[in-house]
Image: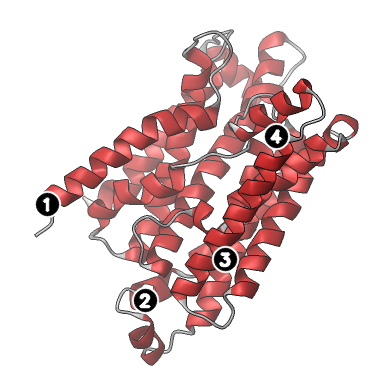
Amino acid sequence: MTRWLIPALLLVLILASGASLLAGTLWLRPAEVLAALTHPGPDLAGLIVTEIRLPRLILAVLIGAILGLSGAVLQGLLRNPLAEPGLLGVSAGASLGAVIAIYYGFAASFTLATPLFGLVGGFVTAGLALLLARSGGTLALILAGAAVSSMAGAGVSLALNLAPNPYAAYEIMTWLMGSLADRSWDHVRLAAPLILVGGLLLAMTGRALDALALGETQAESLGIHVGRIRLLALLGTAMGVGAATAVAGAIGFVGLVAPHVVRPLVGHRPSATLLPAALAGAILVVTADIATRIIRFGPETKLGVLISVVGAPFFLWLVLHVRTRAP
């Protein structure tokens, strides 16, 4: 099963990506999409594919992959099955940064102000969590992340409470629900380099995660520098997840669920979970983004809302399933 897992996930991702280019308010034929990709032109189908759906698809793949990968790394690093990117406060910090941009009107005067402020917020909270936990171990990092996340969440709530007008409050709430609608190549150029570098840093922790499964003391006896691995994981999460949250808003459950879906298929080895978790996360976000376009209850369903609605019951089922199999 392990041998065919990655090819199977890649095939599903390719099929989902193709469907993402076809689906929308105006459905396109495969021939139209292929023509738009091979010979871009000023016609309607070409503009829809190259200027609207393709950047949206690229962001969905990158965001899903970094969320799944960071979730797998953090669960291995912290040896906590409930660990996910939001645990370290990165998502909350990026959300607070974006909310500040909307609250003070920077977003109205500069298109990329919201994601740029979100990036700064993610880095600041990650740095603060690392600073608070620098002399402690895993537990100190978890507690520092929870404290920073709570402070950032309080800041977001305060901004909503003191919003100067209903429009500002609506903009903040809309952004917090997470979405890939109206994203452009500017957002791809802003987020993609940071997500790719963050993913590379996270991938470098693979061998160390296998050793950490035995415990920090045993890992250090095998030559693993636990502090360095912790720094790599936190920096990679801050760069990758911070950039993802900055351009798409808060998207939960992907980093929590994706590693659990693939872990039983790779023998529960932390390093072997990383790539499948990234692919599973990408598939989840791409398919959820397709669903937001074809499931209509009035306005377009927000990506973060849809993933939470589906992810929460699925994770509950997963917990019950694991409990029934536990000795």
Q: Is disc 2 placed on a helix, strand or loop?
A: helix
**Sooner in the amino-acid sequence: mark 2 or mark 1:** 2
**Which residue is denoted by mark 4 in the rendering?**
160
**Which residue is denoted by mark 2 in the rendering?**
212
Marks 3/2: CA–CA distance: 16 Å
Q: Which mark is residue 305?
A: none
Give the side of residue 239 with respect to residue 185, left or right: left
**Residue 28 against residue 200 in the figure, above or below:** above
Marks 1/3: CA–CA distance: 32 Å
Tell me the quadrant of the picture where the C terminus can be found. bottom left
Q: What is the x, y in percent for residue 104? A: 85, 38
**Which residue is denoted by mark 1 in the rendering?**
325
Marks 4/3: CA–CA distance: 29 Å
Identify which amino acid the numbered label 4 is placed on: Leu
Q: Nearer the viewer, mark 4 or mark 1?
A: 4
Identify which amino acid the numbered label 1 is placed on: Arg
Q: What is the x, y in percent for residue 169? A: 72, 27
**Sooner in the amino-acid sequence: mark 2 or mark 4:** 4
Marks 2/4: CA–CA distance: 41 Å
